[in-house]
Amino acid sequence: MLDSVQPRPAPGLRPPQNGPPLWAAWVTAFTPTVLIVGWIVAGALQPPEYDPIRETISVLSGLGAGHSWIMTAALYCVALSYLATAVGLHGVHRSARMIIAFGGVAGLGVAYFPQPANGSTFDHMLFAVAGAGLLTLWPFVMAYWRPSLPLRGSDASDWSLRQRLVSRGGLIVAGLVIALSVLALYVAAQMGMYLGLAERICTGLQALLPFLVAIGLRRSAMLGDSGSASTRAL
């Protein structure tokens, strides 16, 4: 219902700018889809002893996995999708888009250096940790360049949830949620419990956020509330 309300621009906002093109929105939707479908299909083809709650996605693309090409191909697709997202996500400051691009490069490294049948390798872990860190950082960088929206008062009800997501406060909250999922992943790795589940939640949230941001930016552009801060140096 709020989407049908024409918002009143908040103080300090410039005239509307173009949001991400439609193809970029489709690309961001492709990222979580291919990731989740990849780990479901690849996991279903593993021997019965494979436990997705305990074992990571990397095991599915590792040298000891059955049909490892499925998850490897999915990881390559996800990495390339992040690179395309960095190109097409207009409305996101270029510094944040560069971080997404480097996250995509890290994803290529994760796919190129598979996990061995037992243990892991320095190359694989380096790219995995770098990718997780970069994909956690970018919403905070984007938030720095975004305007704040009123949380209370008569103007507050004029903004939809999608528009709030791409405001400074919404991006900080989203970034904190992802950061907490990364922390949970680290704790699970140290404890040796629920590592696969924690990794799937973490990577799923990281892959989903660009899609939500793309939808929010497109909605903001249509309603004419793009912020001046989001358009600097794009």
Image (spheres, rainbow, N blue to C red):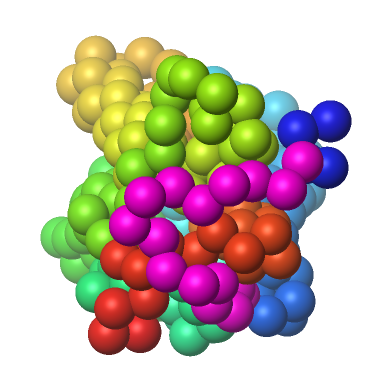
As rendered, which of 7 and 117 lies closer to the eye? 7
Q: Nearer the viewer, residue 137 or 79?
A: 137
In magenta stretch: residue 178: no
Front-most of residues 168 and 98 = 168
Q: Which residues are magenta?
A: 5-20
Q: Is residue 32 above or below residue 69?
A: above
Residue 214, image x, y percentages: 60, 61
| Occupied quadrant, residue 222 | bottom right
**Left or right relative to 123: residue 180:** right
Locate residue 53, reporting x and y percent. 54, 22
Q: Is residue 166 left or right of residue 122?
A: right
The N terminus lies in quadrant = top right
Res 151 visible: yes
x%, y% of residue 87?
48, 85
The residue drawn where x is 60% and y is 38% is 159
* Residue 80 appearing in the image: no
Point 47% across, 57% down: residue = 62
The verdict on residue 19 being magenta is yes
Residue at image location 42% in from the left, 69% down from the top = 14
Residue at x-position 43% and y-position 24%: 151
* Quarter of the rendering containing residue 174: top left
Coordinates of residue 200 in the picture (x, y in percent): 52, 36
> Is 4 situated left or right of 36 in this image?
right
Q: Quadrant of the C terminus?
A: bottom left
Residue 219 occupies which quadrant of the picture?
A: bottom right
**Magenta portion: prevailing SS class:** loop
Q: Is residue 197 above or below residue 164?
A: above
